[in-house]
Each structure stands twice: as structure tokens, then as C-alpha cells.
Amino acid sequence: WGPGHCRMPGSNCKAQLIVRDRFTIHGMWPSNHSDPQPDTCINDRNAKGRSLDPTMLPVELKNNLKRSWPSYTSPDPEIFWKSEWVKHGTCSFNKFNQIKYFYQAFNNWNGMGLYDLLKSEGIVPGASQTAPNTYEKIKFIEAIKRHHFRDQVTVIPNFYCNKGTKKGTYDLREIRMCMDNNGFEYMNCTGTSKDLVETCGSKIDWYA
């Protein structure tokens, strides 16, 4: 959630780049259930894919990524895409080449339709940047499961927040979904990795 991400100290966001009418992609990260997590997986086998060449991405895909995967610090989102590819995408090179990786990320984002899904359930950010709407975290979970998982108990997203301005409050920053290593089936985010430890409480402030 751009406004939440940009409320973090040191985020260096440009105000004119912050998207407030949809969730956007942070990344698609190959992960383990326990640490250490894969990072910058460059070796002789995937050397050809070590850096991203955006000119190789189809025009339609690039246009879709500009909407779904913008940068909040630069008007050129390709810088962000390159960084995410080198750090994370290279670790899935045995499954996804560069084009497939970005197609998969966009298709997952597009299929989830998270902002509109929550809006249809009456869950929306506050009317201003200083007055959030506050919801029980379970309301987010129930809405997502109702629309996508037919109330499967096992498929629950992870929530990440900034510490709020008042003690015991939490400011929504990210909603993360876990998938199998083929990138198609959602699964519960379980494990001992620090990346799976949520940082939100039972109530979440959602700022515009």
C-alpha cells in the first residue's frame, strides 16, 4: 500500500508518485520456510539472466507493469524492476525467465484485485492522509478468503504495518500472499523465517 510504505522513515518517496487508488506490487520473492532466504542467485547456469533488459519485455506487459508495479522514488519504474529482478527474480530463474517472471507477477496482482475486493466489502482507507479508517485485521482476512479461497481456513495472507503514531496502533503497509513454487496455487504463509513474522496487531489503521 503506497501511502503506508511512504510513511516509513527513510522511504524517500516522491509525493507525486504515490498511488492511492490501488495496491501495487513490491515484488515476487522466491522464499524458504526458514532462513536464510535466497538472494541474488547468480551463477553460471543463469548468468544470461543476471541483469534485466527492459527492452526485451513486450510493450503490453511493460504498460501493465507501469500501472501495477510503479516506483515511489523514481518516475522510471524500470529501475525498481531491475533491482527486484536481480535480488529476487534470479532465484526463480529455473522456473521463470525474465518475461515469464514479470507476467506471473502481473497476473497474480491482476487476478487478486485487492483494492476493489476490499472496497466491495466496505473496507476502504480513511478519507484523508491524517485520519485513517480502523478495522479488525480479521475483517481483511475474511474478505480476501470470501472472494478468492471459498473460506479455506488454510489460506491466510500476511500483514505488515508501521508502528502507529499512538501506542498500540498499526499503520497498514503491505499485504503479502504466499504461493507454491509454480506461482499458481495460493498457500498459507507458515514457517520460521523472519520474513513471515507479521508486524500488525489485531486492529489496523488504513490511511489514504
Image (spheres, grey):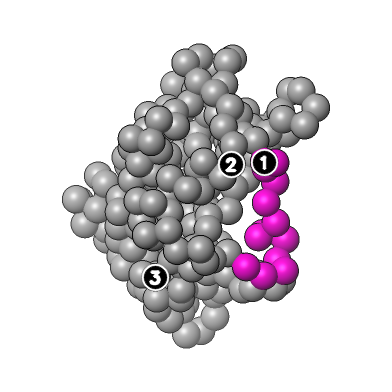
At label 1, the amino acid type is Ser
Horizontal side, residue 68 vs residue 88: left or right: left
Mark 2 → mark 1, Cα distance in angstroms = 5 Å
Which sits earlier in the primary sequence, circle 2 or circle 1?
Answer: 2
Camera-near label (3 vs 2) is 2
Extreme-right residue of the structure = 167
Is-magenta flag for residue 24?
no
Q: Position of residue 60 (x, y in %)?
A: 19, 50
Q: Which label's residue is closer to the chain start, 3 or 2? A: 2
Q: Is residue 204 visible?
A: yes
Q: Amino acid at mark 3?
A: Glu
Q: Which mark is residue 137?
A: 2
Q: Amino acid at mark 2?
A: Lys
Residue indicated by mark 3: 185
- Asked whether the residues under the numbered discs 2 and 1 touch, taking CB atoms below 8 Å apart as contact, a structural biologist would say yes
Q: Which residues are magenta?
A: 190-202
Asked if residue 198 is among those painted magenta in the image, a careful observer would answer: yes
Number of residues whose C-alpha sits closer than 10 Å to that of mark 1, classed few (under 14), some (14–19) or many (20 or more): few
Q: How many marks?
A: 3
Kindly report the distance in space between the C-alpha atoms of the residues bearing marks 3 and 1. 27 Å
Label 2: few (<14), some (14–19) or many (≥20) C-alpha neighbours in 10 Å: some
Q: Which residue was labeled with disc 1?
A: 202
